[in-house]
Amino acid sequence: KMAVGVLLLSAYLCSILTHRLNDESHELNKQEGERNVLGFAKTIFVTGNTEAVVHIPEKPTRILLALHGCSHGALDWAAPSQCDGCLGLPEELKIVRESGRRGFVVVAPSSVDRIHKCWGPSDVERVTELIANVRKDYTLASLPLFAFGASSGGHFSSVLPLHIKLKAVAIQVASIAPSVLEEADMYPPAVFLYMKLDKRTMARVSDDVHVLQQRKVIAASVQLSPRSLRGYLQNRVDDLRKEQEEELLRFLRSQQITNENDEFIVNPREINWRSTLEPIRGKIQLDTLQPDRSVLLELFNVAFAQHELYYSPSMFRFFEGILSCTDLTDCKNPLA
């Protein structure tokens, strides 16, 4: 009996020590990044069980859970100057900056799958726990939670309302799983953001919006059309000068990759950009041109408008319209 008692006591003490170590690890794994580089009071990098970047504004009023697509991760959402490995992709940083301007705390986790880097069922508990910890650690318990996700992150964000209370959700270049729609009566307001050349997603989004509206859920959809590269590249790339943009545009037209309006006439994902742009590498500063890590390639994909994460001002208009409603049953579609 004494031996059993000693074993039980040891196990109990071990469990306490493990709990404390886990708590300490949670605290030690948070590192405060460079302040204000993106307009926030602080940026925290969370490592360990769940990798995440958390941007906190001076006066937080709401929380945005930002979910990447496949082949991406949390460090897309932090500026390169903030940490080793921070990518600071342009559309992600545009969303982050606009979020901070509007009082959003931005919580951007990585999926547990670091091979394909897509989201799956095993991420639900990790993400809900992350949100709970951020609320607790930074006294944000009362703030409304919104979710945004693109592609795989869009599918994942569409499932989250079944597991965590959301004020509204933005589902980008993705649709809702049929099994989720079966519980649509309890679904939060949803805005779907899709690209004009993504015909399959367009059809599914149309069906999703119809089902949600039939069940009295506020739902809207917004299409992004192909855009000209002129001005867009310089607007998103801080160190790209006007003459460099012009040199690049002139070259793309000469290779019959874009038309006279500097719009893509071929899918940029089908081009080997390293070899294609080699002739002008000495004239303009190019990045790695590595898919899913390149600033330029992300912008090319957005301009083509088939399948890519992108900044949409309509998302914020929708979210703030929902926030202005005291009773959702009497709330009109903010984008109508």
Image (tube, grey):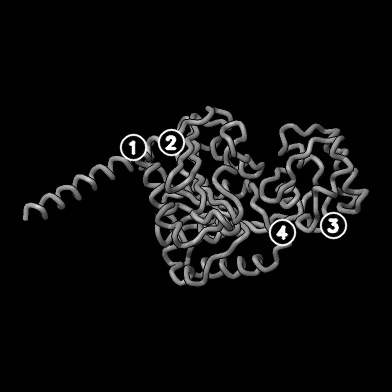
Q: The N terminus appears in which quarter of the rendering?
A: bottom left
Residue wearing tag 4 = 306
Residue 132: image x %, image y %? 37, 47
Give the alpha-carbon distance from disc 3 to disc 2, as whole Å.
Answer: 45 Å
Question: CA gap, disc 3 to disc 1?
Answer: 54 Å
Which amino acid type corresponds to the residue marked 1 in the rendered image? Answer: Glu
Residue at image coords 23%, 46%: 14
Q: Nearer the viewer, mark 2 or mark 4?
A: 2
Instruction: Judge left or right: residue 25 versus residue 160.
Output: left
* First reached walking from the N terminus: tag 2 or tag 4: 2
What amino acid is labelled 3 in the image? Ile
Residue farthest to the top, as pictured: 35
Residue 26 in the image, given as x and y percentages of width and height? 38, 40
Question: Which residue position is annotated with label 2?
Answer: 30
Q: Nearer the viewer, residue 1 or 141?
A: 1
Q: Secondary structure at mark 2?
A: strand
